[in-house]
Amino acid sequence: MVNNWIKNIQFKLLPGCCLLCGKLSEKQQDLCPACRNKLPFNDHLCRSCAQPLPSSIPAGSICGRCQTNPPVYDHCFAPFRYQDELTNLHHNFKFHHKLAAGRLMAELMCERLAAPSVRLPQLLLPVPLHARRLRERGFNQAQELTRILSTHLLIPVDTRSLCRRRDTMAQSGLAKKDRRQNIRDAFTLTSKINSSHVAIIDDVMTTGHTVNEIARTISASGVSTIEIWVFARTP
């Protein structure tokens, strides 16, 4: 109650500014109604990996890749398609350290996770960066998203049990056929994960090789239900 009162006062004094178009927002969020209406929601998707599907294929089908090579994880939650203004929002967060952009991304994810049918996990696990990459970038965008999601959803975070033991090449710079081999055995567990239902958190998912390799790593410790939570999925 007190927090809501403080937020109302703050919004009256400092109205939100839409991070997509720059106009003042009418809500306690840095997103205006016009831009919200244009968000590329990922509603026509594979029910396994959340890959956007062609309109000719019924929504909720399983895509061809998941039929041929089923992922280790159980389900992917990706509420948006990675396109249009959302690419700029993500770049500002990941490469320019605009934490307000990350906060908006996490808030939009929480809105979609608020559905009564969603069974929330017991633990959130951010995709870790290698120590060298973390020093270069200055922060881990997956960990920052996870921190905000944890605060909103009241789910604990584990940033210690999973680590990146190999400093792999950036996946974005590799051909799709090389990405699986690049990330193979890149992660290890430093301690057992005691939760049975875990969500792995990342910002954007393209081929899914990174999160699938993490799912393979943690499944060996006895985790029975593994979800992937990302802000957006690349079409």
Image (cartoon, helix red, strand yellow):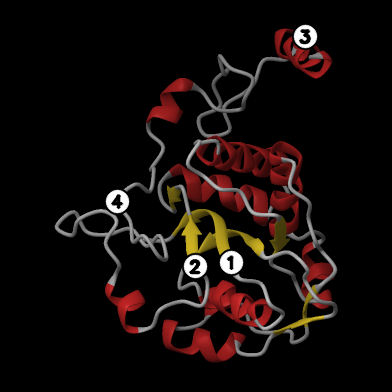
Circle 2 Cα neighbour tier, 10 Å, few/some/many (<14 / 14–19 / ≥20): some
Q: Which mark is residue 44?
A: 4
Residue occupying image coordinates x 55% and y 76%: 212
Real-space Cα separation, disc 2 to disc 3, in angstroms: 42 Å
First-in-chain label (2 vs 3): 3
Q: Which mark is residue 9?
A: 3
Q: Which mark is residue 187?
A: none
Real-space Cα separation, disc 3 to disc 4, in angstroms: 39 Å
Q: Which mark is residue 74?
A: 2
Instruction: Examine the image and state in which quarter residue 234 appears.
Output: bottom left
Real-space Cα separation, disc 2 to disc 1, in angstroms: 5 Å
Residue at the extreme left: 56
Q: Is residue 95 above or below residue 165?
A: above
Circle 4 Cα neighbour tier, 10 Å, few/some/many (<14 / 14–19 / ≥20): some
Give the amino acid type for the residue marked by disc 1 in the picture: Ile
Relative to 168, 70 lies left or right: left
Give the amino acid type for the residue marked by disc 2 in the picture: Asp
Q: Is residue 165 above or below residue 58?
A: below
Q: Is residue 136 above or below residue 115?
A: below
Q: Which mark is residue 226?
A: 1
On the image, the x and y values in percent for residue 142 come to 69, 58
